[in-house]
Image: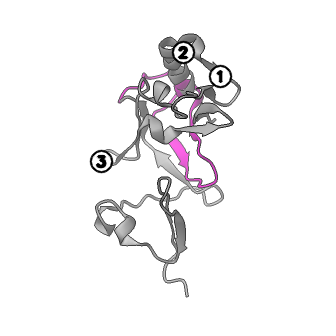
Amino acid sequence: MINETIAAFSLSQEGSRSYVTFGERNSSQIHGGVKSLVSFKQINEEWWTIDVEKFMYDYEMPGFEGSTDIAQAVIDTGTSLLGVPPEHHQYIVALWKQTFGEEISCDQVVCFGKINKKTQDCSEYTDRMQPVQIMFDSESVFEIKPEGYTFIQENFCIFGIMEFA
C-alpha cells in the first residue's frame, strides 16, 4: 500500500545502485535527513512545475531587458538537461565560448566538446566551468557543479544546459 503521494529518487555514482520508491522515502539517502527537506508548491500538475526565483551561473546573472527574475522549473526525471530562459542560456554560452573558443561547438540545444581520450572524462572542461545555482526562494539555493550538468555521450562531453522558453 502507498502511504503518501510521493516518489523518491536516489541517483548514485557509478558502482552504486540507483533506485526509486513510491509512497515512502529512505531517510538514509537524504543528506541532512528528512528534516532538511523543503517543500515547494507545484504550479502545473501536467509538467510538475514549480516557481524559481532566480537562476545564476557562478552566483551571477545580469538582468535582461523585458525579462523577469521569476521563472519555472520542470521537475523531470526523464532528462539530464537543465532548461533555462533564452537570455540566460545565451549569456552562459557566451561565457563558455569566451573560455573555450574553438574547443567547443554548440547546436540548437546544447554545447559540447570532445572527450579527453586519455582520461575518458570531461575534466578539461569542467575544471574551467562554474557551478549553476537555482534559487527557489530567498532561503533555498540548489547548487549544481559542472560535473553535475556535464555528461558523456558518444565520445563527447555534453554541457547539459539548454534554452527553455
Looking at the rendered structure, the secondary structure element under dot 1 is strand
Bounds of the magenta segment: 59-88
How many C-alpha atoms fall within 10 Å of the one at disc 2: few (<14), some, or many (≥20)? some
Viewer-nearest of labels 2 and 3?
A: 2
Tell whether label 1 touches label 2 (CB within 8 Å). yes
Viewer-nearest of labels 3 and 1?
A: 1
The residue drawn where x is 49% and y is 78% is 4
- Residue carrying label 1: 106
Q: Is residue 142 magenta?
A: no
Query: Disc 3 marks which amino acid?
Result: Glu
> Residue 25: image x %, image y %?
44, 72
Judged by its main secondary structure, the magenta piece is loop
Closest to the observer, 11 or 109: 11
The numbered mark, 2 or 1, whose residue comes first in the sequence reads 2
Looking at the rendered structure, the secondary structure element under dot 2 is helix
State the CA–CA distance, disc 2 to disc 1: 9 Å
- Residue carrying label 2: 97
Which image quarter holds the N terminus?
A: bottom right
The numbered mark, 2 or 3, whose residue comes first in the sequence reads 2
